[in-house]
Amino acid sequence: MQERIFAEFKIVKFPTPKVVNEFNEPFKCCDEKRLVLAHATEPETWKNDVTSAWIKLSDVTDTIEFRLTKNGASTVYTPFNVAFPNEQNAWFTTIKWQDVLNSDGAGCYKLELIYNISGIAETLTWGIYDLKPYSQETSKYTARLRVKFNLKQDVEGINFTNANVEDTIRFNGFIGFRQPNMEIDNLIYQDRTLKTVVRENINSYIIQTDPYTAPILEQLTDLYLLSENELYISDYNVFNNSHNILDVPTVVTESPEIDYLVEYQRSAVLTCTVSDRTNNKRTYY
């Protein structure tokens, strides 16, 4: 008989950065800043951006600290850790930029994840943000997606169910081109008159970005449009036919498409069709 020794080794997965560092103008006050807006007093969700970050640790002995700094200095606002209810050793935090604006003011912020996984200590930059007070001027030329993650996400390796993690992404682009997509059901009576049975509007909207390189397009396709459980669209362009596209609840109905424009350049445009989440705009006999 040979002597055998049993040993078990856990697979350790280290987090990868979610930083979007290639925004085009007018966001680009430096190479890595991302625009976030908030209003000091008004509570409307479409005026106040939020940012969430998350991480999955490998063991109960691992540690995580979410740190927010302004121009390299600690902020009065302190992010706090929230445990995922259905995923062991996984944590998230949500930055409410309205609270940050009131506590620390506008300026340049960095969100970092300081973690120790299996004895390896590292600092991960989640994002760098240019916080400005919300106004028609600061929001001009932008559109925004607000999402809630509440599904099991294989791409993240985290079960988000019952967590309702809220996040927003603001980008240069346009959300609009509403089409009613009216469904019509009429009935021809014996006297050959035509009368309404059911008519229903199933509104659709187009999300279209300005030309971007891969980082932001991948965030849109592989996170926000793929993993959302609730999706709210907002558009802030003055030339939009409607100025009422402000946190309209929608759902993705057609696959996003990426147009790579012309050959031998890096920028591409993402287009995606979404529709009303609740179809209650109808009349019937």
Image (cartoon, helix red, strand yellow):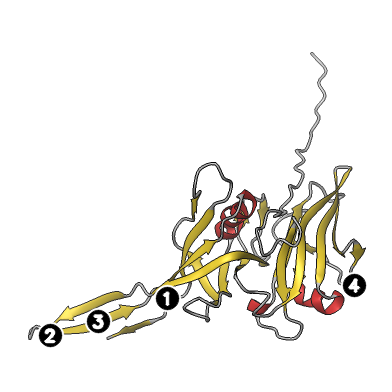
Q: Is residue 58 above or below residue 285?
A: above
Q: Residue at x 42, y 76 (%)?
A: 279
- Measure the C-alpha gap from mark 3 to mark 2: 13 Å
Which tag is nearer the camera, tag 2 or tag 4? 4
Q: Which residue is mark 3?
A: 197
- Amino acid bearing label 4: Val
Q: Earlier in the sequence, mark 1 or mark 3?
A: 3
- Measure the C-alpha gap from mark 2 to mark 1: 28 Å
Q: Which residue is mark 4?
A: 76
- Amino acid bearing label 1: Asn
Q: Earlier in the sequence, mark 2 or mark 4?
A: 4
In the rendering, which numbered label is found on residue 193?
2
Which tag is nearer the camera, tag 3 or tag 4? 4
Q: Which residue is mark 1?
A: 279
- Measure the C-alpha gap from mark 2 to mark 4: 71 Å
Q: Is residue 118 above or below residue 268?
A: above
Q: Cβ–Cβ below 8 Å for labels 1 and 3?
A: no
